[in-house]
Amino acid sequence: MKKLLSIILIIFCIFSSYQISYAAQDIYQFTSIQNQNRFQTLTTQLRCLVCQNQNLAESNSGLANDLRLQIYQQIQQGKSDPDIINYLVNRYGDFILYQPPFKAHTIALWLTPFILLLFGLSYLIYYVRKEHT
């Protein structure tokens, strides 16, 4: 009996997660495959400002829906990818980019991993030398 309930629960979880993921997708009509590919590329390259480390394609937040619609409308208007990205960066800042440019105000973002790696390696060398003496 417990085995049957477990199987039913697993099947229910599979089908309910399928329905949720299907319902969360936005469907846009494009005039060409190139525009559809541009939309998919842009929404995967841009960060959702509300969600933790999700791109616009993955996010279900209201802001992500609005931004996807904005990207769709700009593609339909014939704007180029750099124009769309520049519009969003001017409006929301460099944080919307997964790869922000190397500027004075983003230098800490780019250099912090290397500085932490350098400190970690320095400590490791210090620790190994201390243990061997």
Image (cartoon, rainbow, N blue to C red):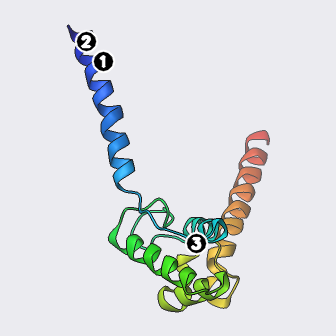
The local crowd at label 1, few if under 14, some if 14 to 19, many if 20 or more residues have their Cα within 10 Å, is few
Q: Nearer the viewer, residue 25 or 86?
A: 25
Residue 91 rendering spot, x and y as whole percentages: 48, 90
Do the residues under discs 3 and 1 have CB atoms within 8 angstroms? no
* Residue at left offset 72%, top offset 66%: 114
The mark found on residue 90 in the picture is none
Q: Quadrant of residue 67?
A: bottom left
Do the residues under discs 1 and 2 have CB atoms within 8 angstroms? yes
Does residue 17 appear left or right of residue 37 in this picture? left
Q: Residue furthest front?
A: 31
Whether 56 is drawn above or below 75: the answer is above
Residue 54 rendering spot, x and y as whole percentages: 48, 62
Q: Label 1 vs label 2: CA separation?
A: 5 Å
Q: Secondary structure at mark 2?
A: helix
The mark found on residue 7 in the picture is 1
Q: Nearer the viewer, residue 124 or 15?
A: 15
Whether 23 is drawn above or below 48: the answer is above
Q: Nearer the viewer, residue 4 or 73?
A: 73
Count of number-bearing discs: 3
Q: Secondary structure at mark 1?
A: helix
Q: Amino acid at mark 2?
A: Leu
The mark found on residue 4 in the picture is 2
Mark 3 and mark 1 lie on one chain; the one further toward the N terminus is 1
Q: Nearer the viewer, residue 97 or 116?
A: 97
- Position of the C terminus, as image quadrant, is top right
Does residue 17 appear left or right of residue 114 in this picture? left
Q: Amino acid at mark 3?
A: Thr
Q: Nearer the viewer, mark 3 or mark 2?
A: 3
Do the residues under discs 3 and 2 have CB atoms within 8 angstroms? no
The mark found on residue 31 in the picture is 3
